[in-house]
C-alpha cells in the first residue's frame, strides 16, 4: 500500500484487529443490506443505516449539520476520534460515509477505510458478534461543508460540452449504455436510461481485485489513463445515488492523489429525472 498517494487512509483487517480495544478508534459498519449488521459485525463496531441516518428524512439530501453531529455524538465519535469505515458490497456505503465525514470537515488523518470490507473480514475467519456496543456519548462539532468534495447539478451543467473536466460515470456498462436504469433489486430509479453527455465510463468494480481489495497504484493509474482521464483536470464522479461514485472518489483522491475531485451525489436519479437535462446513450 506504500505506493498509494495517501496510504494511511486505507487499513488492512489485521490493523483493525489490533485496534479493536483502542478507545481513540471507532468502527462504523455501513451496509447496502441494512439488516447485515444485526446478523453479525466486527466486535465494537457501531452500525449506521444509510437509508435513515446518512440522508435527510424530509429533503432529498445529505444530513444537515445538526443531524450529522447527533449521529457522531450517539456513536461516541469526538472531533479527535479516528473513524474506520467498512461494509458490504465492497465498501459502497462505507466509502459514502467516509466522504460525508470529509464533507463535514472531519480531519483526513482520522478517516480510514478497511480494505476488502466486511467480506474480507469474514473470509479470514475473524470474530463476528451480535451484541450492540453502547459507547459513551461524545462531544462533536461539525465543520462547515467542504465545497471541494461535493458537486451539484449546476456544476455538471457548467462543464457540459467542454473538455475542462473529467466527468466519470462509475456505473456498469449496461447502465451507462442505457440498457438498464438500475442494478437488479435497487429501488431508486430514473425516468430515462443513459449517461451524461461527455461522461467517461470507468465502472467502480474495475478498481478492485477479486477479493474486493483495491488494485495497486500502478494498476489504478493505468486503468484511468487508458479510459482517457486527465489527472491534471478537475474531476467529477457520479453513479446512481452517489455511493459507488464515493468509492471511486476515494480511489482518485486518496489512492491516486488526484487534487481536484468531487462527488456528484445527486447522480443519475437526479439527472435522469430532471427536465431539460440532456442524456446520451451508447
Image (cartoon, helix red, strand yellow):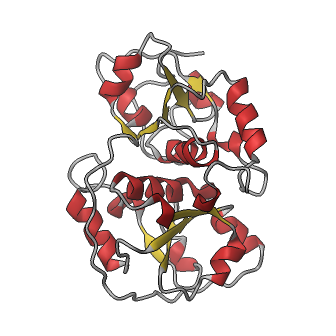
Q: Residue at x 61, y 61 (%)?
A: 8
260, above or below 107, in the image: above
Q: Is residue 249 left or right of residue 76?
A: right
Q: Residue at x 60, y 82 (%)?
A: 19
Q: Residue 73 location, x and y as percent? A: 30, 76
230, above or below 205, in the image: above
Front-most of 222 and 264? 222
Front-most of 111 and 241? 111
Name the quarter where the N terminus is drawn.
bottom right
Q: Residue at x 21, y 63 (%)?
A: 66
Name the quarter where the C terminus is drawn.
top right
Q: Residue at x 62, y 41 (%)?
A: 204
Q: Residue 41 location, x and y as percent? A: 57, 78
Total marks shown come to 0
Q: Is residue 116 left or right of residue 253?
A: right
Q: Residue 164 location, x and y as percent? A: 47, 17
155, above or below 172, in the image: above
Specify whether residue 5 is in view.
yes
Front-most of 235 and 94? 235
Q: Residue 69 location, x and y as percent? A: 27, 67
Can you name the residue that lies furthest to the top here? 161
Quarter assignment of residue 106: bottom left
Specify whether residue 179 is in view.
no
Amino acid at each position: 500500500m506504500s505506493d498509494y498517494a495517501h496510504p494511511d487512509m486505507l487499513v488492512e483487517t489485521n490493523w483493525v484487529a489490533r485496534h479493536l480495544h483502542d478507545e481513540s478508534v471507532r468502527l462504523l459498519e455501513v451496509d447496502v443490506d441494512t439488516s447485515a449488521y444485526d446478523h453479525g459485525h466486527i466486535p465494537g463496531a457501531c452500525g449506521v443505516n444509510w437509508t435513515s441516518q446518512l440522508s435527510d428524512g424530509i429533503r432529498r439530501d445529505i444530513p444537515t449539520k445538526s443531524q450529522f453531529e447527533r449521529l457522531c455524538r450517539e456513536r461516541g465519535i469526538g472531533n479527535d476520534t479516528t473513524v474506520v469505515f467498512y461494509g458490504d458490497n465492497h465498501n459502497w456505503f462505507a466509502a459514502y460515509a467516509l466522504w460525508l465525514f470529509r464533507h463535514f470537515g472531519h480531519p483526513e488523518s482520522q478517516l480510514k477505510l478497511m480494505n476488502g470490507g466486511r467480506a474480507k473480514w469474514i473470509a479470514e475467519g475473524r470474530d463476528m458478534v451480535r451484541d450492540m456496543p453502547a459507547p459513551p456519548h461524545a462531544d462533536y462539532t461539525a465543520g462547515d461543508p467542504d465545497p471541494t468534495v461535493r458537486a451539484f447539478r449546476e456544476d455538471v451543467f457548467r462543464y457540459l460540452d467542454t473538455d475542462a473536466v473529467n466527468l466519470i460515470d462509475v456505473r456498469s456498462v449496461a447502465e451507462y449504455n442505457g440498457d438498464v436504469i438500475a442494478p437488479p433489486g435497487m429501488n431508486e430509479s430514473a425516468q430515462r436510461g443513459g449517461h451524461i453527455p461527455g461522461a467517461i465510463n470507468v465502472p467502480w468494480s474495475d478498481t478492485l481485485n477479486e477479493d474486493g481489495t483495491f488494485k495497486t497504484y500502478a494498476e489504478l493509474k493505468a486503468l484511468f489513463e487508458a479510459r482517457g482521464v486527465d489527472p491534471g483536470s478537475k474531476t467529477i464522479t457520479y453513479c446512481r445515488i452517489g455511493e459507488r461514485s464515493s468509492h471511486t472518489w476515494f480511489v482518485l483522491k486518496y489512492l491516486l492523489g488526484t487534487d481536484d475531485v468531487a462527488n456528484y451525489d445527486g447522480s443519475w436519479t437526479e439527472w435522469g429525472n430532471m427536465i431539460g437535462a440532456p442524456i446520451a446513450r451508447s
